[in-house]
Amino acid sequence: MRTFLGKTRAFLHSCNWPLLGGVSFFLIVLLTLWQLVFGVSDWLVTHKDAQIKQLTVLGKPQYTEEREIIAAIKRVDLSSYFKLDVKRVQQEVQALPWVASASVRKQWPNTLQVYVVEHQPMAIWNSDLLLNQQGQVFQAQSEKLADDLPQLYGPEGSEVEAWQTFVQFRELLAVNQFKLVSLALSERFAWQLWLDNGIRLNLGREEKAQRVQRFIDVFPHLERPDGAKIDAVDLRYDTGLAVSWKFPASQQQQNKSAA
């Protein structure tokens, strides 16, 4: 008996306990992972037929009807929750005219959430397109469009510059009680502005901000002929400006008769 106990003590003393502890911990981790993998596998088999049964549209779109968004989503196969192509859903929704961006998220067990951000129309571009708040062009139609959207014109590719210039001058003119309603950039990069009172400002290609300020400074001092209104102000000069006038139709007829 003493011999057996002695051998047992010698064996225990000679064992590398840190190594045995590490091996035991490794085996426990492997067993746990094995159970987890098979558990997930069984769960997937059980729920392999899970389907999308509920669609939720978030973001409160103003110009796009919810039924249009849902119709776009349903162009994608919704028969499997796990195999659903979320990126494809996003592409279909973003293809709608008013949608600027869309984010898509699956929510277990059967819901698909789509958050929609629309373009905000800020101006009409070249009579038939629209500009959003970043100056990006898009094409869409809606009866909800405001009637007083500004009209902007320019060559293709100049949309952002035209919009930024319009915003700059709109703020400058508004401080001085003028309202800017339209802007045009020619193929030769010359600028023209139209105010709500019918005045057209020809700015040319250079120093446009200084020329707008010159108009603001000189306008209160302009002497108007009787019954005349300013038609256009040519500011394409280094220091001065030229003013053209328009008269009421009745006065123009009288002038022709007198001649």
Image: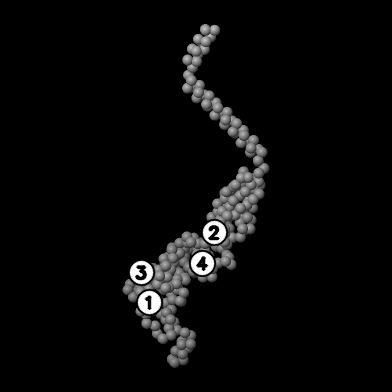
Point 56% across, 60% down: residue = 98
Q: Tell me which numbered mark, 4 or 2, is placed earlier along the sequence.
A: 2
Say what amino acid the circle numbered 2 marks.
Answer: Glu
- Which residue is at 64% across, 53% downward? 74
Other residues around mark 2 within 10 Å, as few (<14) / some (14–19) / many (≥20): many
Residue 210's tag is 3
Give the mark nearer the N terminus: 2 vs 3: 2
- Label 2 sits on residue: 118
**Badge 3 amino acid:** Gln
Query: Where is residue 237 shown, x and y percent of the image?
Result: 35, 73
* Of callouts 3 and 4, the N-terminal one: 4
Spatial CA distance of label 4 from label 2 is: 16 Å
Residue 27, image x, y percentages: 55, 26
Q: Label 4 belongs to which residue?
A: 124
Foreground tag (4 vs 1) = 1
Mark in the foreground, 4 or 2: 2
**Residue 64 vs residue 14, the one in the foreground:** 14
| Residue reaching furthest to the left | 239
Quick check: marks 4 and 1 in contact, CB under 8 Å?
no
Q: Nearer the viewer, residue 200 or 56?
A: 56
Q: In terms of secondary structure, where does tag 4 sit?
A: strand
Between the residue at mark 2 and the residue at mark 3, the CA separation in whole angstroms equals 36 Å
Q: Which residue is mark 1?
A: 219
Image depth: mark 2 or mark 3 in front: 2
Q: Dot 3: what SS?
A: helix
Would you say 80 lies left or right of 232 here? right
